[in-house]
Image: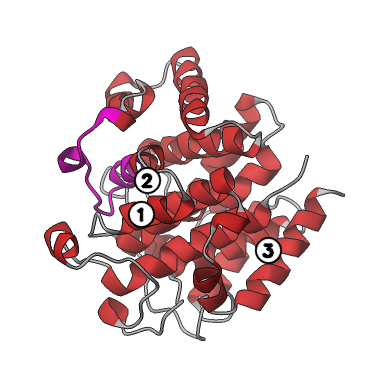
Amino acid sequence: MEYPVKSALFGLAVGDALGVPVEFVGRSWLKRFPVDDMRGFGTHDQPPGTWSDDSSMSFCLAESLCRGYDLYDIAEQFMAWCSGQKWTPHGEVFDIGNATLSAIERLRNRELPPQLAGGLDEGSNGNGSLMRILPLVFILHNKPVDERYAITSDVSSITHGHFRSVFSCFVYLEVARQLLWGKHIMEAYKEGTAIARQYAEEREFNRRELSYFSRILQGKMPEVHEDNIFSSGYVVHTLEASLWSLLTTHSYSEAVLCAVNLGEDTDTSGAVTGGLAGLAYGFDDIPESWAGQLARAEEIEYLCAAFAESLCR
């Protein structure tokens, strides 16, 4: 199997960078002044092509996986990034979620093993694990579903351990897995969510918790009107917004711009959508001018090559 790592990671980072300048901007403003190209400055006063913690943590995960799957090493990479030592776009961390920061502090203090560091309360369901989970698909795609879920749960739980965060990551990776296998977008969505739904039923997961995923698991996302798509930092909102953006558009550019122009948590909506769209459409469909503007583009390309090579060993 060819491993389109470059499509996924550049797709994620470009979507992230498109969203960084307008993070927290409302949808009504973006309706009047939509993002249609790579911008700079704005919310975080960063130059064009700057990606956020979404890409930073994804790159940390990918780099760790180059050496094999090791939760402790993944945690070490996240701690190094938070200290500004690894995978920042310009040498400093300018954006980090509260739940992620709290989990990293627990990791630094060696209070808990990595898979127990993430918050377990209902309020700890920001999108901080979903935004950086995509590199896992490349080591999970040919494993049994029980192992896929267990590894996804452990990696999510380094920062976000609540069921809703874990299951969001699982659904996302199941759709990504179908795209990796070459399925068309609608087919990937239907088959990926069907696997997640069946697994949840077999394992008798909490029905109340699963109800938060009803629109996704029932295959209804393409039918939802934009007014009923939310783009906050809540993990289920991000998963829905990203699937909806992918399912209602017809190219990489359309998908990520659709996601970003939903407003609010624009960098993460762009990143989560961009990773799937990269897998769906391939690297060549990502505008060269966007990919070329990314901070540390050559180093990202080197990481992609190293990760892809490690997968073939």
Percent position of residue 189, x then y: 47, 30
Q: Left or right: 146 with respect to 230?
A: right
- Residue 157 versus residue 43 in the image, above or below: above
Q: Tell me where the magenta segment starts and ends, as one range.
A: 223-242
- Mark 3 or mark 2, earlier in chain: 3
Percent position of residue 248, x then y: 35, 39
Q: Residue at x 37, y 73 (%)?
A: 95
Based on the displayed image, in which of its 4 quarters is residue 85 positioned? bottom right
Q: Pointer 3: what residue?
A: 63
Q: Is residue 37 at all visible to an observer of this figure?
A: yes
Asked if the magenta segment contains residue 227, the reply would be yes
Based on the displayed image, in which of its 4 quarters is residue 270 positioned? bottom left
Percent position of residue 106, x then y: 46, 62
- State the separation of the CA atoms marked 1 and 3: 23 Å
Q: Pointer 1: what residue?
A: 269
Seen from the viewer's position, the closer of residues 209 and 298 is: 298
